[in-house]
Amino acid sequence: MDKTEFYQRLAAILDIEEVKPENVLKDYDQWDSLAILSVLALADSQYGVTIRADEIRQVVTAADLATLIEAKRK
Amino acid sequence: MKCIFRNKRIRAILSVVPGQESRFDDERSNYNLTEEKARRMKKMMGLDRHRVAPPGVCSSDLCVYGLQQLLNEGTLKKEEIGALLFVSQTPDYYLPPTSNVIQGRLGLGHDVVCLDLNQGCAGFVIGLMQAFMLLDMMDADKVVLLNGDTASKLVDKHNRITYPLIGDAGSVTVIERCAEENPVHLCLKMDGSRHRALIVPGGAFRTPSSPETLKLVEVEEGVVQSLEQIHMDGAAVFNFTLEDVPPQIEEVLSYSGNSRESIDFFLFHQPNQFILKQMADKMKIPQEKLPNNIVGIYGNSSSVSIPVNITHNCGKQLRNGALRVCLSGFGVGLTWGSMVMNLGPLATCRTVNYEAA
């Protein structure tokens, strides 16, 4: 998957300019249940994968999230 | 399960909502939310206002109010009623069945069959299924389906996850036999292994009511709930809706020989605007054919959300003509059921405000 595009989409969900792979999601005030639902929706609509609640809870950085989605696409 | 019902149709639908509106902006101070978060939530979930029944008003009161109107105006006569179905998760009592209580309140004859069904989000589709099956077997002309829920009594008004979304409502649907074949196609699935995704864990017999079940516990920052209130695993329900419902819509369309284009409206249960938009996109259904406005006007009223959706969005069209519709209810159980049918012209199809006598 196109990582640059993924980070752009994640930035849009968090309503910020840019997300870097090493950024910790919990550091953002906007990383709440609404953002998590938006990520589940993004995973489903753009990448055709389903992320479970327990999986998303284990994610720390933006890169972890990208890795999780990528692994599920295989 | 899938099946076809024939020679039956819906004759009338009346939705009843509490008269008083409650606005999200006015409730915001209950929720421990920053202005920014409230704005995001409002936009994403499509929140604006909802209807909450005043204390002492039960689901059955909303239904009786509607049924009384249909009887008074002559849309329905007492002697035509063969069965009274009451679908709810908020009955008057553990026992007796609320449908019996309603029969007594209205003075209906002793030959009327009264049945309570404990169903939620799919409760309109399941209620119709039960009504069609009864009409197959009994000699009476009409079955009355009552859907009623007052979820406001199962959530805490400080809970920002559940309270802003819910709405209280009742509906009366009259189902009858007809000479035309009028096939109704139903696809229905259930998965009890996921029953904890939407649950009121305490207060019944598995975990009886006690000071412990009534205690408000903080489940996440600023969100409290007791074991006697609705617990929702939001992510699990979200995934279920996107994974399991679209294939069923495909199935019921092909089973009934329809395409997306031949359906006039997809009238679905109304959990929130976000999930409904996602579903429409995923199924490539134009947004205008799949209304998502009910949660922001009346709130999500569980099994009553489909009738409210029908009367609010299609009332005029269905009083004057017919539409080919796809109905779908999904949630508690987990249960998901979808139906394709020709609906209308209906003797009545409207939303009325409940005013206490």
Image: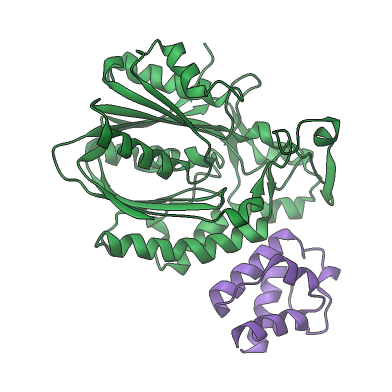
- Quarter of the picture containing the N terminus of chain B is bottom left
Return the residue found at the far left. Answer: B179
Position of B238 with respect to B247 (left or right) is: right
Provide residue B202's location: percent of width, then percent of height. Answer: 74, 38
Q: Which chain is green?
A: B
Residue at the spot x=58%, y=22% of the render? B95
Residue A33 figure quarter = bottom right
Towards the viewer: A64 or B122: B122
Q: Is residue A19 visible?
A: no
Residue occupying image coordinates x 45% and y 12%: B104
In the figure, the purple chain has which letter?
A: A
Work out whether residue B304 or residue B231 is closer to the camera in this orientation and state it. B231
Q: Residue at x 67, y 72 (%)?
A: A12
Colouring of the image: by chain
- Residue A25 locus on image (x, y percent): 80, 72
Q: Position of residue B122 (x, y in %)?
A: 48, 46
User: How many numbered circles are shown?
Assistant: 0
**Above or below for B104 versus B53:** above
Q: Is residue B74 left or right of residue B44?
A: left
